[in-house]
Image (tube, grey):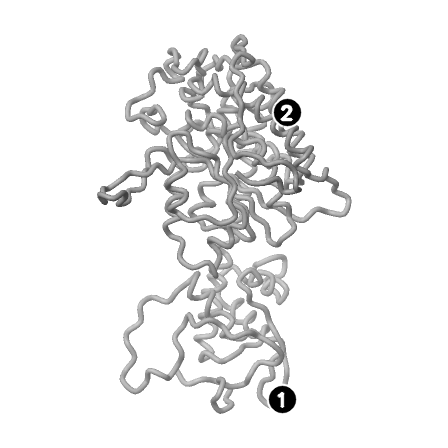
Amino acid sequence: MTGDRDGGPQRTAAGTGTHSAEATVSGPRPSPGTALGGRRGDRGPRRSPGTDGPVQGTAQQGTSVPEGGSGTGNREGTGPRVSGDGAVVLDELRAAIGRYVVLPSEEALTAVTLWVAASHIQPALQHAPRLAVVGPTKGCGKSRVLDVLYETVHQPMMTVNTSPAVVFRVIGKNPPTLLVDEADTIFGPKAGEKEDLRGLLNAGHQRNRPAWRISGPEHKPTAFPTFAMAALAGIGDLPDTIMDRAVVLRMQKRKPGERIAPFRSRYSAPELNALREKLAAWLTPLRGTAAALVPAMPVEDRAADTWEPLVIVADLAGGHWPASARAACLAMTRNEVVQDEQTTLKTRLLRDIRRVFDQAGDPEALRSQDVLAALAQDAEAPWAEYGTKGLNAYHLANLLRDFGISPANHRFEQGRQAKAYARNQFLDAWARYCPDPAQPAPAPGHEAARPARGTPPAPLSGSLPIGPPGGPASPTRAR
């Protein structure tokens, strides 16, 4: 599909050989117990992926399975019959990934390894987990992760930017594994409306969620399949609805002492392609077995749906992988809960600062210390107990940084200068994260009394003006 990034020979997007004869089936292994986490709630009868009927023999029933599967898993003690080489192949893949990228944790490295392997049993899965590779800045290794995935996943399709129409047409009965780099250019604040693509990626997390479009010369309603595994890399978080369906890698820049092998397609690709062939040889004959498995999960609801394919692969491999997969699932989902709480805290801060400005008469700027004092006075807010001694100026600036808001020197009455926050810096964030409820129309003759909220903020440079641009200097504005 794409040329060698380093000037080497051309590569195709598919290129995944299968060697069924090499994937022998060994004796049964015990399935992992439930000590690492509680069982999931009853989600009703399992359906065979890609069909409307129930699975012919579930893991709980212990009956035979289709597609050449050689045994089924059982929650109560008998595990699936698996290839004796599965754990070895995963160990090799994990080591290879770790040579080229520095991931945020050992659990993250385990998760990426299992995600790659799960792409090879995609036809057997009920859910297609997203892999969100995000970082705060450039140079965190996000694109390098996609380079490694391109050489190891099933039928990769790499793109830097794409449209819903393209994705609709490439997903079929044997969908590719979508690899989307620079996803922030698709979903970022300057990317415009991308609701169709976001909806497609959300729907494609679960099987049997087609998108209907009018298509063809006869303009007939046509159902386009959406089910496909996808990895998306970009600066900053992706939309919440995608992050909620993803295994999230929060990448960071390498420390001076952290070393990785340089990635060069001419010699890195053959090594990784050989691992892809081993994965296909091991997992392709076990798709029927994988379709029947209902593994015990340490998490529930959507997190369980997202992580289930990774745990299925780990249970098929045996060895240390079932325990490692569940430990990674717990650690990484808990980390995202903390991230969500932090995001919620930042949204609360935006709302409270808007209240502070409103109570002060909506001045053009407020001193940092005045903002902090007003926040601490709210007995129902968390700010008085934030940190060890309450919210301070450093904490405030740090919490607002992700919204592009920072303090600057401002000249107040009588020529006094102080660090302050300009109201116009908050307008965009207020409009996005905590918009006002619908307001009644202004009375005639008062339309220009105050600008509408949500107006993009003016660039902040140097000293802030005392009064509105173009108007008389005044410490407050008319309401």
Write the residue at 45% across / 16% down: 73
Front residue of this view, candidates 264 and 260: 264
User: Which amino acid, by three-letter code, is at mark 2?
Assistant: Asp
> Residue 8's spot in the image, x, y percent?
65, 38
Crowding near the residue tagged with mark 2, few <14, some 14–19, many ≥20 C-alpha atoms within 10 Å? some
For the residue labelled by badge 2, is the local secondary structure a helix, a strand or a loop? helix
On-image quarter of the C terminus: bottom left
> Residue 288's spot in the image, x, y percent?
42, 18
In the displayed structure, does residue 45 sit left or right of residue 402?
left
> Residue 13's spot in the image, x, y percent?
52, 34
Query: Which sits earlier in the primary sequence, circle 1 or circle 2?
Result: 2
- Asked whether the viewer can see residue 282, the reply is no
- Asked whether the viewer can see residue 184, the reply is yes
Front residue of this view, candidates 23 and 476: 23
Q: How many marks?
A: 2
Res 415 label: 1
Front residue of this view, candidates 445 and 189: 189
In the displayed structure, does residue 199 sit left or right of residue 253?
left
State how far apart marks 1 and 2 are (Cα): 67 Å
Write the residue at 51% across / 71% down: 425
Write the residue at 56% across / 52% down: 235
Write the residue at 56% across / 47% down: 134
Crowding near the residue tagged with mark 1, few <14, some 14–19, many ≥20 C-alpha atoms within 10 Å? few
**Residue that mark 2 sits on:** 91
Q: Nearer the viewer, mark 1 or mark 2?
A: 2
User: Which amino acid, by three-letter code, is at mark 1?
Assistant: Gly
> Residue 125's spot in the image, x, y percent?
42, 28
